[in-house]
Image (spheres, rainbow, N blue to C red):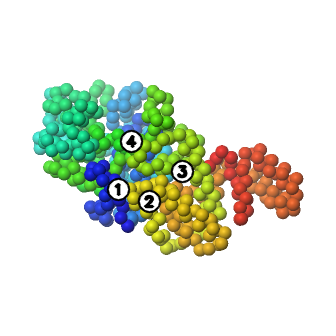
Amino acid sequence: MTLYIHDTLSGQKVPFEPTNPDRVTMYVCGPTVYNYAHIGNARPVVVFDVLFRLLRHLYGEDKVVYARNITDVDDKINKKAIDEGVDISVITNKFADIYNADMAALNALPPTYQPRATEHMPDMVAMIEDLIARGAAYVTDDGEVLFRVADYDGGSGRYGKLAKRSLDDMIAGARVEVAENKDNAADFVLWKPSKPGEPEWPGPKGLPGRPGWHIECSAMSEAKLGLPIDIHGGGQDLIFPHHTNEIAQSCAAHGHSDPAAYAKYWMHNGFLDFSGEKMSKSLGNVVLVHDLIKDYPGEVIRWALLSGHYRSPLNWTPELLEQSRKSLDRLYGILLRAKDIPLQEVWPDDVIFGPLLDDLNTPGAVARLYEIAPALDSMVERNDPARVKTSFMALANVLGILQQDPEVWFKQGASDDLTAQVEALLAERAAARAAKNWPESDRIRDALNALNVEVMDGPQGATWKLKGKA
């Protein structure tokens, strides 16, 4: 089996060939932990979690190393800590824990490593000192260290290769950090003095302060994974300047001219939009994962995020969530009917992973599940061996869905007391129907309706779920 991915660097769909099949590496830019994560932040987590699962299937669980960082020093973090009169760790620990719990609710596996910027200050300082020594960076009069972009580019266009833009174009609309005493408008900050009240660390050349944003990921990714990284991922908004600057400083620090010397393949997910609008505080349409999981099972949110191809925009609507809930209901219903069929020990035919091998085509993989589902249902009726169930669940596991017991899925939110009451009523209902006591059966139906319970009759008896729940 060959995995094909769209590589942002080359602009083409290419076969994936890791540097070392016994140690496949992936790095994805993680959150800046000063607040709750919104649903847009969750899309790369879910997308690259599917890729992580697929790589583990292809190469072995112990042969894939995945790092997703936490940025725990930042202007917004510093401001929040000063406003609340606490150390930055109070803010970052709180929101890092919330972030991890929220992503786990979406069935995202924990990465192999989750490095924090504050834990890798010596790595950043060492890299910056190497850049200064090579002449690729310089110290300004006000104690900042800046990267020499024009020298790195050298007129070759390599600085803008990932973004597919020229240096002049990038300067014209630059999202670069403002700094005085720049040699060139495109030069970006590697290290800067801390403001009063902000934390600081001993820096390059003995300069106290803190790192710029871009150097963090370069240092952390190399420290945890080594170079070159096989796959580097993130959202499209990170292509420039963040990923562009990561490539420049990492390659310059090692004297490389080829951007692929830092990361062989680059993958970027598309944005979410909200009926044609971007999510923003000013529009009042910010959707927090922490709030969503109070109203929807995490798998519903995950299914919705996987309903579109990762590189395409995805319109996020309440209707998408409701349709995702119904889709999972249907598949869990099939699994409920097939609950007594054991999984085979023989691994399924790898043809079922075809859509995912084609640039992580999750809509195609979902369609493949629906192709398998009727066959699984017919096997339930015929009580045939369950090779189909094994294939069905293997694909579901790589997608990170259908991970709950079907009976638990349909009873989410039901208390123990309610469960006992409903089970007793269902037993009375079965007895009434067996005795053809239709008035009693109708009475029990009304009692179940009053409890907001929907009964699902099947060949193996009646099951139930709470109306409006998954």
Q: Are marks 4 and 3 in contact (CB under 8 Å)?
A: no
319, above or below 357, in the image: above
Query: Which residue type carries mark 1?
Result: Ile
The dot on residue 240 is none
Which comes before the other along the chain, label 3 or label 2? 3
- Between disc 1 and disc 2, whose residue precedes? 1
- Local SS, label 2: helix
Secondary structure beneath label 3? helix
Tell me how far mark 3 sits from mark 2, CA to CA.
20 Å
Q: Secondary structure at mark 4?
A: loop
Inter-mark Cα distance, 3 to 1? 25 Å
Residue 59 in the image: x percent, y percent?
A: 37, 65
Q: Which mark is residue 31?
A: 4
Label 3: which residue? 299
Q: Can residue 157 be seen here?
A: yes
**Percent of width and height locating residue 441:** 84, 54
Q: Is residue 420 visible?
A: no
State which tag comes first along the sequence, 4 or 3: 4
Q: Quadrant of the N terminus?
A: bottom left
